[in-house]
Amino acid sequence: MIPVHTLFVSLALFLGTVIAPGLAQAAPVVTPQIDSFEVDAVERLEAGTDLVFTLEGTPASKATLRITGVKRIISMQEIEPGIYEAEYTIKLKDRLTANTVVRASLRRGSRVATAKLDQPLMIAKAAPVATPKPVPPVIEQFRMAPAQEMDPGTELKFTLKGTPNAKAAFAIEGVAENLPLVETPAGSGVYEGRYTIRRNDNFPPGVNITATLVLGEQSAHARLEQGDKDKEPPVIKNQRPFDGETVSSSNPVIISATLDDGSGSGVDPRSVRILLNDRDVTRDSSIIASAIKYQIPQGLERGQYRVEILAKDLAGNSARAAWSFAAQPGESADQRLPLNIYSPANNSEVNGDKIEVRGRSWPNTNIDVEVEASTALVGPFGFKQNIFTKSLQTDSGGYFDFAFEPPIKQRGTRYEAKLKASNGDQTKEQTLILFQR
């Protein structure tokens, strides 16, 4: 029989031999891993809204997250092996945006894995897709450039402004249909067309001229307003010689005036009549839509002369002007300060890049000059601009001259030169009207 103490010693030695080898091997260290990190995005990041974060990774680890701008660290609970979840309620002081940075940490022992949230906190709303509706074309302007005359061979120029990249045409009632208006340049929305008057064409006052602009299946229409809305007659002004003036019969005498229809339909040159002492001198006169001029072919006899001018615009509105002047041999009997313009003649047409003006007053007289240029387009279109200002003095013979250069070379441009002479306590003003040929 084996003694009891011997049995215990043997058992202890046996157990030590079995257990000791296992205690000599250390447990393996596991590095945590984050497989995914997500948030349930919300529609609005406002106070009281809950943000729910979910992380998947190594189980039996400690998971936390940090939200930029939020001071405390938020713990995540392992709701299933390897699945962690945390909920955060937005506070009033928080200033979160869709792109606020959020980071998660997964710790196991001394080792840590981190991940950054790569999705926005807020749901991105897609902009509603609207079905575009066809937009009808629009005509902003339809006008015709003023014609100097309405005789056969005259070219009429039309301009339409409206929706670009469309098809445009115009028609003259009783004369021509479907005349093209070409967009120039392409995509500008400015369309231009022309028509040359034929010998058998009939253009009554207020003739109906219309334009059409077509885009896809829609169209716009406009009427050239020149008849039914033009109720004002033209104005005849700037008459020369002046009413009551005494001129020298020894010098050539030119009768002239300007014709101004403002924003109306324009003066019809064919309607103009010029009478000198009731004698019709129209055939021997120069007449355009904006001015008339008649030069008396020989020296006048002493006496009184009466001038009468009759005109109509294209809408049929009538205008009349009448005035008188006197003629006597030799120099004028008027002893007031003179201010005479010798060239160019008033209401005449000029061309070239430089317009020279010559005149005469008393010697050593101060002359102040202002020149204004303006277009004479039909309707409320055109421009007006001061292009020349100068002060000068006449020479010992009383002569003076100056020159100005037009800023544009458009036919029909009107130049109004206002001259004021000053000598001692006397002054004299004179206006010279010229037109670009």
Image (spheres, helix red, strand yellow):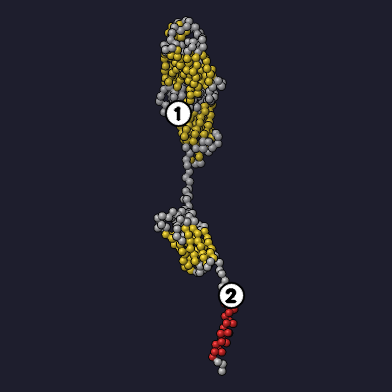
Q: Secondary structure at mark 2?
A: loop
Q: Which residue occupies 45% across, 16% down?
A: 420
Residue found at the very far front of the displayed protein: 5
Q: Which residue occupies 48% across, 43% down?
A: 134
Label 1 sits on residue? 380
Looking at the picture, tell me which residue is in the foreground, 284 or 390.
Answer: 390
| Quadrant including the C terminus | top right
Sequence-wise, which precedes: disc 2 or disc 1? 2
Q: Which residue occupies 47% across, 45% down?
A: 133
Residue 25, numbered label = 2
Label 1 Cα crowd, 10 Å radius (few <14 / some 14-19 / many 20+): few
Looking at the picture, tell me which residue is in the foreground, 428 or 95.
Answer: 95
| Residue 434 appears anywhere in the view | yes
**Where residue 113 appears, x then y in whole percent?**
54, 63
Label 2 Cα crowd, 10 Å radius (few <14 / some 14-19 / many 20+): few
Determine the CA span between mark 2 and mark 1: 104 Å
Q: Amino acid at mark 2?
A: Gln
**Where residue 215 appears, x then y in whole percent?**
50, 40
Q: Are marks 2 and 1 in contact (CB under 8 Å)?
A: no
**Where residue 414 appears, x then y in whole percent?**
49, 22
Q: Amino acid at mark 1?
A: Pro
